[in-house]
Image: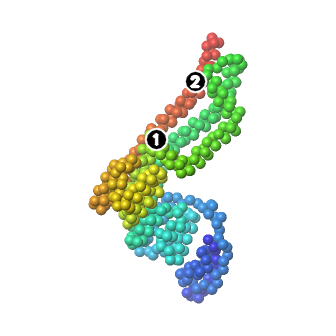
Amino acid sequence: MPEFSYQASNTEGKQVKGTIEGLNRDEVIRQLVSQDLKPREVTLITEGKQVRTFFKKKVKTNDLVLFTRQMSTMVSAGVPLLRSLATLEAQAENPTLKSAIVEIVKDIQGGAQLADALGKHPDIFSDIYVNMVRAGEAAGIVDDILKRLATQVEKNASMKKKIKGAMTYPVVLLSLTVLAFFGLMIFVIPQIGETLKGLGGPDAKLPALTQGMLDISNFIVKYWYIVIALIASTIFGVRTYIKTPVGHRQFHALVLKLPIAGMLTTKIAVASFTRTFSALIGSGVSVVEALRVTGKSLGNELFQEEIAKASDEVVNGKQLSQSLENSKLFPPIVPQMLAIGEETGQTDLILVKVAEFYEEEVDTAIASMSSLLEPIMIVIMGAAVGLIAAGVMGPIASMGQNVQ
């Protein structure tokens, strides 16, 4: 953003100098006037520092939750919005969040609504966040909406943290297995091969398993650059294909068909849908808009398509519960609970209960997955070690018998 230097006088007539950022000279003057300063000279210093945008520090979930809760507390206590934001900007430790708050304050001073100002920073504030704030501004309950948002962000972050924690151990074991395989093939197997040939002679016939391991080892050692290129090109090709519309959808469809991952993905999507949709509906957002925003937040294209289809049917006059009755992705409990909510007018409260139920299901599934994956990975590592041991010890034992 452009930076300006200014000279002004305060209410006591004293001269004040400094620098300030603004979109243009007129906005800078408005900012100075709002601070009870009388501008005398405003000069452009630089057109902006766009280079910084490449090195922005990511705003962590904890920072966003703390910002949301503190702003909710201050607004609930009757502190003016601009003063609340100024206080939060002063104590913010994350430089990216601090910079965003400064720009939000400037936008609000220029006449923008809070939701519109937040919407200019999509890397920090999601569509769900912005839409809930916009609904809160329309209904005059921004403080209550901010409390709901903080809870929403905390729940989502907690679920992601549990999933990452459950996957850490299997990923570490798999990585160690791959490293051990290549280490043995590059450094150990060639030495063993030389030893076996020395004992049995150059014309000695080795078992098929041992010979196969030696051939793989020789190929890796001799053509290592081909192996690296093949692995890199495979990874690059798969990632590139997944980024295409067709590949993206096929990958999401494959995930849903996997035995453990599919079940877990479905539970996570249902929990996320019910809690997010509940929060938006409870904030006063229309059903169609809530469906549009919620669909984008689920992270699975098939669920997004299902919700988009339901949204079209709602526009045509159909109840949401009826639209999801024949869904192959959403379990029957979701349309049933939606129907009860539509009849009683308490859709948001009922869906919160569904969300809590499925969040508990996700916790249980993650714990089960961890207990199941650990022995599977140990068996895979044991099988790999046993295979190599059989390939090495088999010919040694055979030669020992021949010697006897």
Amino acid at dot 2: Ala
Q: Is residue 281 left or right of residue 94?
A: left
Give the residue furthest to the front.
316
The image position of residue 365, as x and y in percent, is 41, 44
Question: What residue is pinned by disc 1?
Answer: 258
Q: Do we see residue 364 in this rendering?
A: yes
Residue in the image at 60% along x and 35% along y: 180
> In the image as oriented, which residue stretches furthest toward the left?
344
The quadrant in which the N terminus is found is bottom right
Q: Quadrant of the C terminus?
A: top right
Q: Nearer the viewer, mark 1 or mark 2?
A: 1
Q: Secondary structure at mark 2?
A: helix
Label 1 residue SS: loop
Question: 127 left or right of 396?
Answer: left
Q: Residues within 10 Å of mark 1 (few under 14, many from 20)?
A: few
Disc marking residue 390: 2
Please, what is the three-letter code of the amino acid marked with disc 1? Leu
How far is the residue under mark 1 from the one under mark 2? 32 Å
Asked whether residue 351 is in view, the answer is no
Q: x, y (%) of residue 92? A: 53, 66
Quadrant in the rendering for residue 39: bottom right
The answer to which of marks 1 and 2 sits earlier in the sequence is 1
Vertical comparison of 214 with 336: above or below: above
**Residue 147 place in picture, x, y as percent:** 41, 64
Badge 2 density bin: few <14, some 14–19, many ≥20, Cα 10 Å: some
Tag 1 and tag 2, C-beta contact below 8 Å: no
